[in-house]
Image: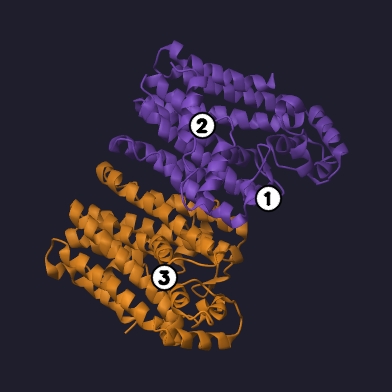
Chain colours: A purple, B orange
Amino acid sequence: MYSINQLFSFVDAEIKNSYKKREPQQLYLPIDYSMSVGGKRIRPILCLMACNLFTDDIEQAIKPAVGLETFHNFTLLHDDIMDKADVRRNQPTVHKKWNENTAILSGDAMLIAAYNYFLDLKPQILASVLPIFNQTALEVCEGQQYDMDFENQLFVEESAYLEMIREKTAVLLAAALKIGAIIGGANENDSRLIYQFGINMGLAFQLQDDYLDTFGDEATFGKRIGGDILENKKTFLLINALKKAPNSIKPFLEKKIEDSKKIKMVTEIYRDLEIDKLTQNKIFDYYKKAQTSLSEINIDEDKKLELTNFLNQLKSRIA
Amino acid sequence: MYSINQLFSFVDAEIKNSYKKREPQQLYLPIDYSMSVGGKRIRPILCLMACNLFTDDIEQAIKPAVGLETFHNFTLLHDDIMDKADVRRNQPTVHKKWNENTAILSGDAMLIAAYNYFLDLKPQILASVLPIFNQTALEVCEGQQYDMDFENQLFVEESAYLEMIREKTAVLLAAALKIGAIIGGANENDSRLIYQFGINMGLAFQLQDDYLDTFGDEATFGKRIGGDILENKKTFLLINALKKAPNSIKPFLEKKIEDSKKIKMVTEIYRDLEIDKLTQNKIFDYYKKAQTSLSEINIDEDKKLELTNFLNQLKSRIA
């Protein structure tokens, strides 16, 4: 079994300088920039870990893994234009460093380039992997659209919110795992189980982000606490608070006020309504479901160690 | 052999209402709009004609043909954002009718959706067709980038210009033909020849557009004459005029003046320098090369009739 560090270095070696010298530079330099700004490479590493569950020879999965990372970085690039975000990973975003047209077109090229990484697969494997990638890519766009739609909606159902984060975050993690598993030779049932593992892990992970944005520790979370509250973002927390809050408090929760006192007040309301516990329970539910799917995969338990560790590390963000 | 009208109706039936009822509507309605605004469906029809050269059963090629049209419409959608174009085919562009974020994200979804149309192909055919589509898609982005780069360059080489229009226009026509031929069972040599046919036809077609923008007839060309001259667009005409013009005239040709008198004056300069004849000769050269490639394809001449007619119809725009 390969360690996460080893997998990381395979991914990095494949990414390095792929676009640096390609012409026209105005098209490819932003792609190189966006791919090398870094990140945790979670999706390609999950893809390789899943492949490694079923085979020792993970070579075939490295390029598709990088294709998934390329797709993920493409979504960040275009999302940053739509969100008018100036900074990503402490660096200027592509549309800030260059301009908006460059960011649109380089993003398009990046999305197309993501498909390139699948083309060396054997025809039969390509034919089973590509529909998964393609449906996932479309679902990620749908998730982003729902996310934007929700900004203009007064009320969002919990089920609609969960479906949005499933599409926006969970499906790509799940697809990375399933694609890796298929390339590694997994059967249909195990591929289905690892996809379920990914969906539940992804939902837990995103709800944790919601939770930590209010109840996290600024130093370890890495973002300013309370951003969602200030923006009145319809997260799992706010959606449930609006369900449980007495009518007298609802208008305050619904109102957008740019005042740092609001963070403290809303956090207190959330605690009074036990939204923290409700969210924690939901998160642990999803982690448990993920654990169950993993345990049902029909391979030696010791091979699952890396994925179990990975899951526990994610989980520990909240402890 | 199917007639162009029959092929058109196959394409239209496949396109019709594909996205109308899909959720989220804000994502899919702009795709439906952009696909149904119309157009001549040149790429899918070429794809089906090429397939029909080699087989009577063109059913398998219909979806990929629509995939090519979907990709083409995606490029128009994103190009219109970059060009800040308000109108396309007499209708408001997507970013005008909705907004820019919607146009970016719906365009992305449309690009992904284009790939969906290839997924029903048999694995071996998918594996030979997809790399062609993918490389072509990337080249189209490169062509668009060069086109934008040229706006900020004082001087553009003729060879660089021809390479730009090859990528921006010709490769997608050529790929449509080659993909159709491969699905129809063409061998490697015939696929290569039909690709060459497409490249030369595409170059001729684009140079004709350049020519007609200055020397065309407003009623039949369908666009205002002289737009390129007013914008100082570095077309084949201007590039060659700058090579042939005496030094005293060059600054006038290079200067951007928003004055309708400029159209008449530059047109006269072009005639004096015989740029019209030079361009016509180049166009006929490319049409001749296309004709030669077509004649070398190893099938009965009577099967080539539809494609020959198609080529002659394009050619007749200039007669």
Kindly identify which chain the residue marked by label 3 belongs to: B
Q: Label 3: which residue?
A: B39
| Residue depicted at x 45% and y 48% | A112
| Residue depicted at x 58% and y 57% | A101
Mark drawn on residue A43: 2
Residue B102: x percent and y percent? 59, 56
Question: Residue lying furthest right in this view?
Answer: A261
Q: Amino acid at mark 3?
A: Gly
Other-residue count near label 3 (Cα within 10 Å), few / some / many at <14 / 14–19 / ≥20? few
Closer to the camera, B190 or A207?
B190
Closer to the camera, B49 or B275?
B275
Q: Is residue A118 above or below residue B77?
A: above
Q: Is residue A93 above or below residue B166?
A: above
Can marks 2 and 3 be said to lie on one chain?
no
Task: Name the quadrant of the C terminus of chain B.
Answer: bottom left
Residue A300: x percent and y percent? 41, 12
Q: Amino acid at mark 2?
A: Arg
Kindly identify which chain the residue marked by label 2 belongs to: A
Q: Is residue B186 visible?
A: no
Numbered disc 2: secondary structure: helix
